[in-house]
Image (cartoon, rainbow, N blue to C red):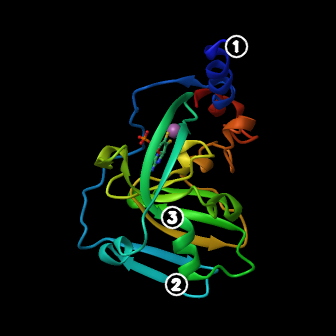
Amino acid sequence: MPDRVDVLDSSTNRLPPGQIITTKWPVLHSGPVPPVNLAAFRFKVTGAVVRSLSLNWDELLALPLRETTCDIHCVTRWSRYDNVFEGIPVRAILERAGVRPEAAYVLVHAEEAYTTNLPLSDLDRPANLLALSHNGEPLTPEHGGPVRLLVPHLYLWKSAKWVTGFELLEDDAPGFWERNGYHMRGDPWGEERFGREDPVRMRRG
Ligand SMILES: Nc1nc2c(c(=O)[nH]1)N[C@H]1C(S)=C(S)[C@@H](COP(=O)(O)O)O[C@H]1N2
Ligand SMILES: [Mo]
């Protein structure tokens, strides 16, 4: 049996439809890179939770760290394989806050008023992190340092850089890119790139 067949098969299966592999890591966001101020940092969990949280930097770092090795997929059609992120499991945060039964969606908040929405079932997964490092190096400010959300099974715009909180909601509410035409869920395997409305804006991407 030739060795290459397995390699080709597995790489084919790892690339969602319409994506191209890059070994670089492009930087993409709207607006400026916010300044880092760890003394003022708070990670807030609000909305449909038993206990609202406001964790400062030391309280966040006191939570257990974990690694996620994953591929990442950007809606602008690049995918990057074999990324090792380290950070705080999102589940550890949700468990601390205690999710109330009526919570079904989350609006993720970040610096500079960036928001992105996703179903709670997509946020509450073991691979998801509040990521602090990438391939052994602290996250650079351009890639969301000091801390970004990582939700690797959805397009990367859901992985909010400079993340500052989760708002647990009963009903879905569009975030920044979602209000600008991006999909409410964003599954790369289903090519959930854009919402249904406004095909002109959809083509501009
Ligand atoms: N706070 C914030 N996070 C953000 C964005 C943004 O504009 N602001 N853009 C998203 C988009 S559209 C993408 S593709 C990824 C890019 O992450 P990267 O620059 O680390 O590749 O960040 C996401 N997270
Ligand atoms: Mo993006």
Mark 1 Cβ inside 8 Å of ligand 1: no
Dot 1: few (<14), some (14–19), or many (≥20) neighbours within 10 Å?
Answer: few
Q: How many other residues sit within 10 Å of disc 2, few (<14), some (14-19) or many (≥20)?
A: some
From the viewer's perspective, tell me whether residue 110 is left or right of residue 168: left
Q: Amino acid at mark 3?
A: Pro
Identify which amino acid the numbered label 1 is placed on.
Answer: Met
- 102 left or right of 176 in image: right
Q: Which residue is mark 2?
A: 52
Q: Is residue 168 above or below residue 84?
A: below
Residue identifier under label 1: 1
Picture disc at residue 89: 3
Which residue is found at the position 59% from the left and 64% from the top? 107
Q: Secondary structure at mark 1?
A: loop
Circle 3 SS class:
strand
Task: Give me the residue at 62% from left, 25% from top.
Answer: 11
Question: Tag 3 or tag 2, which sits nearer the N-term?
Answer: 2
Image position, residue 5 (x, y; %): 67, 16
Marked residue nearer the N-terminal end (2 or 1): 1
* Of the image marks 1 and 3, the number of the one nearer the N terminus: 1
**Residue sitting nearer the eye, 33 or 151:** 151
What amino acid type is highlighted by mark number 2? Ser
* Residue at the far front in the pictured view: 1
How far apart marks 1 and 3 lie (CA) works out to 40 Å
Alpha-carbon distance for marks 2 and 3?
A: 18 Å
Placement of the N terminus among the 4 image quadrants: top right
